[in-house]
Image: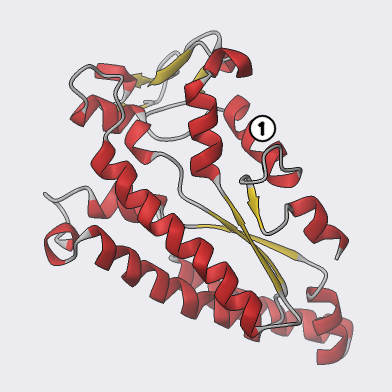
């Protein structure tokens, strides 16, 4: 399938802003309108899943250690967020990377028992998340007219996987739909019959959470259940600013 890079999406956003200016009659009206919008941005998962941890296809894991790779991603992220800010965005929700090392695909390929999460992948994800949280502070300190927040999806996932039954999940290490070990070696194929009780599965396929899991993440992002879910405030409070 075709994809639009985040840089491409930022360029598209710039064009959209020019259309908003024309629709509202002035840059001042457009700026006032855009300042009330919430920009929810979740990046990084594919940079690890479909790049860094695919050494047969990409060289990044040989060129960078996890710390260096996270720095490269954050550097690009910073430039892209600055571009959005320059074109009127003022309320940002930056969503952290989840526990990619616990996905059915990672378990199928790298876990001996098919249950134990792959620590080297999760460790790299934690490095990125730590730098992303620092980026929130950096932008908030530099821009008094904007508000950036960080959503700790990694921590929310960790909470769910440590006590899945409390959230209604019975299966946390296999996809509801897929092929091979953990239903994670090949993702859900056309005409393939998925599991019947998808609300009991944490993962829909080799990579993606189910709707039931996303509902939990969404609710805790909007109204933090734990102080660590959102930093420095949750989306509900961001919307009130």
Q: Quadrant of residue 143?
A: bottom right
Please indicate, yes or no, whether residue 179 appears anywhere in the rendered image: no
* Residue at 58% over, 71% down: 137
Please indicate, yes or no, whether residue 106 appears anywhere in the rendered image: yes
| Above or below, comparing residue 124 to residue 8 in the picture | above
In x, y percent, where is residue 15?
Answer: 63, 80
* Residue at 48% over, 63% down: 132
In x, y percent, where is residue 55?
Answer: 14, 51
Query: Foreground residue, 129 or 59?
Result: 129
Q: Quadrant of residue 239?
A: bottom right
- Name the residue that disc number 1 marks: 215
| Above or below, comparing residue 133 to residue 29 in the picture | above
* Residue at 56% over, 76% down: 138
Q: Quadrant of the C terminus?
A: bottom right
Relative to 69, is 217 on the left or the right? right
In x, y percent, where is residue 93?
Answer: 65, 60
Label 1 environment density (alpha carbons within 10 Å; few <14, some 14–19, many ≥20):
few
| Above or below, comparing residue 24 to residue 99 in the picture | below
């Amino acid at each position: 399938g075709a994809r639009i890079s985040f840089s491409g999406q930022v360029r598209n956003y710039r064009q959209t802003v020019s259309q908003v200016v024309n629709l509202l009659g002035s840059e001042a009206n457009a700026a006032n309108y855009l300042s009330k919008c919430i920009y929810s941005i979740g990046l990084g998962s594919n940079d690890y899943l479909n790049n860094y941890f695919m050494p047969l296809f990409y060289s990044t894991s040989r060129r960078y250690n996890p710390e260096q790779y996270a720095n490269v991603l954050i550097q690009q992220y910073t430039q892209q967020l600055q571009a959005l800010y320059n074109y009127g965005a003022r309320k940002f929700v930056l969503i952290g990377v989840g526990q990619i090392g616990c996905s059915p695909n990672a378990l199928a390929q790298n876990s001996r028992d098919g249950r134990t999460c792959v620590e080297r992948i999760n460790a790299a994800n934690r490095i990125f998340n730590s730098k992303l949280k620092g980026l929130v502070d950096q932008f908030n300190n530099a821009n008094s007219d904007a508000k950036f927040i960080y959503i700790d999806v990694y921590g929310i996932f960790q909470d769910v996987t440590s006590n899945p039954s409390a959230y209604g999940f019975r299966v946390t290490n296999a996809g509801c739909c897929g092929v091979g070990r953990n239903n994670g070696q090949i993702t859900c194929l056309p005409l393939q019959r998925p599991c019947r009780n998808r609300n009991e599965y944490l993962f829909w396929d080799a990579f993606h959470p189910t709707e039931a899991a996303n509902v939990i993440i969404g609710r805790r992002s909007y109204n933090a259940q734990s102080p660590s879910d959102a930093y420095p405030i949750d989306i509900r409070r961001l919307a009130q600013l």
